Image: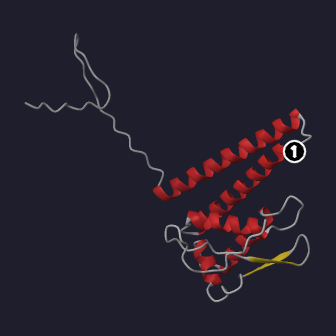
Amino acid sequence: MTSKPNTSPTRAAVGGRPRPVRVRVFRADGKIAKVHPPDGEGENWWGRLNEALGTTSSDFVNASLFQIQAASRSPLGGISELSMNAALAMVEAAAPRDEIEAALAVQMAATHTAAMAVLAKLDVAFATERRVAAFGSAAARLMRAYAMQVEVLRRLRNGGQQFVRVEHVHVSDGGQAVIGNVKKQDVQG
């Protein structure tokens, strides 16, 4: 399977959304890599990374890229450019407004990547029942953590406020009460 890298900074065909920011990974060895802009995106690349991470801090962008890089290792231990770019696309889709939301979005991308890696290990030909159960349990915990992270992001953005209305109902002896939303039916005639 071969695919051409997306190097165009133009708008995507679907929904008019800009294509996600991408990185090129140059490996010094299996554990150390340096990220660079893809060909043709050098001019506005750093600004797009800042925007994708909701920050103006170069240090935060560098730290986030290192964290994404650490979470984007291939099963053989090398750094996966494909996985890094997928994680960056997830972070950018979360549209973080500040560093707190960006850190949460990076965690969400890393949690998703880990969950998918664990699920992939369920399909091993010679897996024992105990191993399948352990991987299934780990994947379920990771997916639950991801769902909780999505909920935390929603609460960060919406303030996490709930609306509770308490009403007092007095019912005299022999009376009846209805609890819930009651709507009058329209009488036509």
Q: Between 116 and 165, which is closer to the camera in this rendering?
A: 116
Q: Is residue 69 above or below residue 145?
A: below
Residue ID at (90%, 35%): 128
User: Mark 1 highlights which residue?
Assistant: 124
Query: To which quarter of the image does residue 44 belong?
Result: bottom right
Query: Is residue 68 shown to the viewer in this render?
Result: no
Outermost residue to the bottom: 43
> Where is residue 95 drawn, in percent x and y?
55, 66
Q: Amino acid at mark 1?
A: Val
- Relative vertical location of residue 107 with respect to residue 34 in this rendering, above or below: above
Residues 166 and 81: in front is: 81
Helix, strand or loop at disc 1?
Answer: loop
| Picture quarter with the N terminus | bottom right
Q: Residue furthest left?
A: 189
Residue 128 horizontal side relative to residue 40, left or right:
right
Task: Judge left or right: residue 104 versus residue 177.
Answer: right
Judge by depth and name the residue closer to the eye, 168 or 116: 116
Q: How many numbered callouts?
A: 1
Count neighbours of disc 1 (C-alpha within 10 A) and say few if under 14, some if 14 to 19, many if 20 or more. Answer: few
Q: Position of residue 85 (x, y in %)?
A: 70, 69
Residue 20 left/right relative to 174 = right
Instruction: Locate residue 185, reporting x and y percent.
Output: 19, 30
Q: Is residue 166 left or right of residue 109?
A: left
Residue drawn at the location 22% of the way across and 15% of the way down: 172
Q: Residue 69: horizontal and vertical position, in percent?
A: 78, 68
Residue 189 visible in the snapshot: yes
Q: Which residue shows up at 62% across the image and 48% down it?
A: 147
Q: Is residue 178 positioned above or below 130 on the image?
A: above
Q: Is residue 149 above or below residue 136?
A: below
Residue farthest to the front, as pictured: 1
Q: Residue at x 81, y 42 (%)?
A: 135
